[in-house]
Image: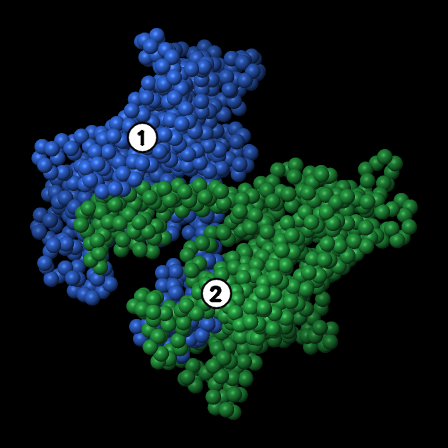
Chain colours: A green, B blue
Amino acid sequence: MKINYLCVFQDFDLASIYVSDAQYNRNIYFDTSPEAVRLYLRYNHWLAKVLLYFFILVDLSLALFEEPAVLPLPIWATMLVELLCLLVFTIRLAHYAKVIPRDKFWKDPKNICIIVILLLTLVDMIIYGALKATNCYGVRWSRVLRPLLLVNVTEGRQLRRAFRSIRNALPQIFYVFLLFMFSLLMFSLMALKLLGKRGLKTIDGAPYFTNYLEIVFDLYVLVTTANSPDVMMPAYNSSFVFAIFFILYILINTYIFMSVFLAVVYNNYKKYLKEEVRQLVRAKRHKMARAFAVLQEHREEGGQPVVSQANWNQMVRLVQPDISNAHRELLWSVADDKNQGYIGKVAFVQLVDLLNIEVITLKSRPHPLQSACPALYLSAPSRLLCRLVQHRAFVIVYDLIILVNAVFIGLDEENPMVSNSEWVFLALYLLEILLKLYVFEPKAFFSRHSFWNWFDTIIVVSALIATIINSAMKSTGGYTSRQILDIVFILRVLRLIRVVDSIKRFRAIINTLIRIGPAILTFGQLIIVVYYIFAMVGMELFKGKVKFFEEDSTDPDKAFCGNTDLKGTAFAQLNYCKNNFNNVVSSFILLVELTVVNQWEKLEDNLVNAMETIDNDQGAGQPVDNRPALMFKIASKRYRTVDALLQRMFEADLDPEDFAENDDPDGNFANPTFSSA
Amino acid sequence: MKINYLCVFQDFDLASIYVSDAQYNRNIYFDTSPEAVRLYLRYNHWLAKVLLYFFILVDLSLALFEEPAVLPLPIWATMLVELLCLLVFTIRLAHYAKVIPRDKFWKDPKNICIIVILLLTLVDMIIYGALKATNCYGVRWSRVLRPLLLVNVTEGRQLRRAFRSIRNALPQIFYVFLLFMFSLLMFSLMALKLLGKRGLKTIDGAPYFTNYLEIVFDLYVLVTTANSPDVMMPAYNSSFVFAIFFILYILINTYIFMSVFLAVVYNNYKKYLKEEVRQLVRAKRHKMARAFAVLQEHREEGGQPVVSQANWNQMVRLVQPDISNAHRELLWSVADDKNQGYIGKVAFVQLVDLLNIEVITLKSRPHPLQSACPALYLSAPSRLLCRLVQHRAFVIVYDLIILVNAVFIGLDEENPMVSNSEWVFLALYLLEILLKLYVFEPKAFFSRHSFWNWFDTIIVVSALIATIINSAMKSTGGYTSRQILDIVFILRVLRLIRVVDSIKRFRAIINTLIRIGPAILTFGQLIIVVYYIFAMVGMELFKGKVKFFEEDSTDPDKAFCGNTDLKGTAFAQLNYCKNNFNNVVSSFILLVELTVVNQWEKLEDNLVNAMETIDNDQGAGQPVDNRPALMFKIASKRYRTVDALLQRMFEADLDPEDFAENDDPDGNFANPTFSSA
């Protein structure tokens, strides 16, 4: 191949973009002109993304300072910040418009969505500002649109997918819901006919089951089992036959129908997600094929095109500059198993999955003390110490110390013996960390994946600092800061969590939970979008309707939360006044309380799948002896992206042809290859 | 092959036993001597099984008549019945002992179990009888053993499998539970430290979160969300920061931990069930191979052994006498696709799955009226009527009638207009059935799988009978029997369910539910075993502790359910007195009430799997015209046995080698073949 240097450079840029798009499952149909490619690289820069999310966060947090505010700020201040946010979003969008072809830009609903949101927000701000300037009543209605930005930015892929899957499952769910309603109405009718004429009384002496709509409501609540068994007691007291009616009702409507609901949701959600993942995989293969087309060369006349190791190396350096030479060669040796120096299309396409596996390069370095003072470090007492610290008994002793510590924490800390013991425990924990640092190579001990080592050190050191500050304040001013004491307490209890790490089974469960973290994060974003919209609407509708009075307030309105409608209600009696929509924090807490019904089935599927993979623990830092000079270790089967996790989950379910390379030139994700040579 | 007739007859008996064992997944290692085979056939007779289950039912129902009884019977009566039951169980066991080799009998834990149960029951009855005869206090402790019979009889296969799967999943569940307890204790400790010293008060004015054990209990209850948000309100009122503590707690312990629990249970249950099903499939193939070995002949010297169609026919006639010739030939033609007149081992082994598919033989018979009076039945008005009844509008009109009927049922039936309208509706429903019988062939209309036709007819006819009885009693005696009126009401409401059948989506959901019936039944048996044991223990411990007084009782003890310990408690105030262990019915209802928390996830998996198969509806009876003379239709993908359902569920997951024929002579299920020729 005879290409001048500039072109080759451009080629590598393009290929590396294709590969990194495949790696992170970006489906952006970008222009392949050199300028657009450079812009695209900048568009995908991590700093740009962090900035974007930072400004989205700022935009969302504005609700804290806008009326009804937690911390009131003048309108001009929040407005200015919001304008700044809008500006950032506009710039980002303009950047995106430059990267992709014009017609693609205007056909994409998410771009239209963002433009509409930005324009509506601007209009709302102007109207609101004008109304406030003339002292009129105004509603900041555009605030409900803010979380939609989270969904519609280019990076909100997972979130969009989740919403799409939910939307697609809705029709099926609707039919089950209809059938459920039908069953509810039938049972209510039967209850009315069977029980309405018997003259039964509820515990309050009210007539029992005589009004159809009330029965429907009572039986609806019974599905949540909230009024069980109260709702059936009058009938049961009259005859045990009626208990069978209620048991049948609960069996059908609570157990069977809710199972059908769940099964339908689960089934449909999974079905649509699978379809989406199938498309993702197809797009990924396609992009790798594109990259291959850019890098390929013909070794022999008429032979299959191949990619040489040199080209591969140069491309990987662009895609992942932080990868070590050894790691890169490891990947190559996996792909080029015959050691030919070049690979074909199939092997090349598979390389993207290898790139996604996190590999830790363990360098068996000697301990710095050994280098500094080998005589001392390798002496008999030092070696004995190392053996002791690495012994199983060392872990057991410290687990026992933690247990004793737990008992001491539970005791009254006013007792001087107990409060002084804290220093002993702190010293013991510090000693443990120092001993471990003496035995294990510090860089390995504090490697990126040694979660528990980091956890321990941070907790112990911050507990030390907080305790010192606390006792310093006590001895000087004679008083204790409640906040600092709280922090000290929290740190003390957190320290106890360490015991989990010593039991293998527990570690496996915790690691599983950490592994499904990204999937939970997507779900969390989804929840925040929904909560935010509800909070904004709720605040506009209900702000100030329910007031909270401090404990020591003597205001007579305190008895009914400042709202005469609540006089004598259970809400006021139970002192629920703080459950209100008076600011965004209260609103979120209230919405969480309302959500607290058993709806955690969404997580389950990910959990089940994540649990099926066998755990491989990182363990603590590695001891220094008897190791080869260089080792690779698969960091974990944890995936860098949710997409990769999803693909693995459905891998067994996907048809084999989806893994075949597929050039599909009319596909949604196809990029035209302009021969830039 | 030259074998005398007797031997051939014996051979077919043996082969048919192997096939039917494979079909129903029986794993009984029976003797193959002619006598044992005949005994085995009798052992598997449906009448023997029905009798067995009848006596188990009688034995279990004895709790209704034994003290504390719903209907008290003298001790000698219940004792006699129980002795009869014990006798039946002993005979059944003795029969079993004759069928299988002696050493196998004594090695099987379920036989030992039954013997121990029988002996203990006998001992208990003697002791109890003696104590009662001397007027001493006695406890019938052996009653808790009764439900174990349900598990240990030969036919309790599914139940044993479910218990085994649960038992195998326990260790994993235990570890998650430990971690959950650890998390609970940590959070409680933190709550004590953070909130205990703030002097907060609960709504009752009691100190808030000052006692560690009380905190643990409160937070444990919070996991079930039963005391949310009450438990957090004092802390939340003091500062919103504490709300975050509680939200974090609920997030971790309710959502995440409960998801992990479920995932572990689901995963382990599925894993062990899959292993069991794998063994089942292996055993089934093995038994079919045995049957093949019995029936095989060699067509050519040195060729593969085969089974001829004649042998196959004779065997099927023994295995399923009720199968039609046409159906049998259909199965054969599927297996012998090259029409050779004989099949090899692989095809033979697969035949058992074909036998398990329910096939309806639809004979396109002319309507009896057509045969009787063709001139009238085929006349223009008659044909018009047939077209009308088969028209979509006919269904819609009757759906509308049902809706109007629903409104009338809801109205006050004291109104003469409303009560007379009932006759109109009854007449309309009867007319519908008669019209359909006129149009559709009656035998097809009332075929075994036309669930809705049977449902309609039974409901309408019984409603007619009950209404006639009711009005007859009213007009003669002038009074209405409450019971009959109740039945009339129930039948009227049930009639409305019919509307579900006209909407295709609803029908699909209902059919899915019917399909997973057998799986639910196994689960129901499991629940009954557990409930029965708890009810027996509860009755011995708590009988008479809580008393129920009738509504009109003036006994002063009524205010506290006859137990001074309950004075002023919420239990007595809410009139829960009937929730007691005073007899077996009350006990069961109480146990159901205690179970009413959301635990319906077990059903889900079956549901999901059942839902994945596309529905094929039976529809109503077939219209008579334009049909071939003979048609086959797969009745449904419903399975006759739970085992078959399970095997289908896991089919995709099973390794292909499990489907390979596998003679495995040392396997658990192997039967020796004595060459009886």
B329 or B233: nearer the viewer: B233
Residue at image position (72%, 66%) is A365
Name the residue: 43% across, 29% down: B617
**Mark 1, residue position:** B455
Q: Helix or strand or loop: what does disc 2 sit on? A: helix
Quadrant into which the N terminus of chain A falls: top right
Which residue is painted at 37% across and 80% down in the image?
A552
Give residue A662's quadrant in the image: top right
Left or right of B382? Residue B310 is right
Q: Looking at the image, how many numbered discs can be counted on the residues?
A: 2
Residue A545 in the image: above or below residue B541: below
Q: Is residue B146 visible?
A: no
Q: Amino acid under label 1?
A: Phe
Amino acid marked by disc 2: Met
Q: Check whether the beta carbons of the residues at disc 2 and disc 1 lie within 8 A of each other.
A: no
Parent chain of label 2: A
Q: Position of residue B218 (x, y in %)?
A: 36, 66
Depth check, mark 2 against mark 1: the one in front is 2
> Callout 2: 10 Å neighbours few (<14), some, many (20+)?
many
Rendered view: A334 above or below A367 = above
Q: Residue A342, relative to residue A564: is it above or below?
A: above
Q: Name the chain letter of the residue that bears numbered label 1.
A: B
Disc 2 target residue = A539
Within 10 Å of disc 1 (Cα), the crowding (few <14, some 14-19, many 20+) is some
Query: In this rendering, does residue B457 appear at all?
Result: yes
Query: How far apart are labels 2 and 1 at the CA level?
Result: 53 Å
| Helix, strand or loop at mark 1 | helix
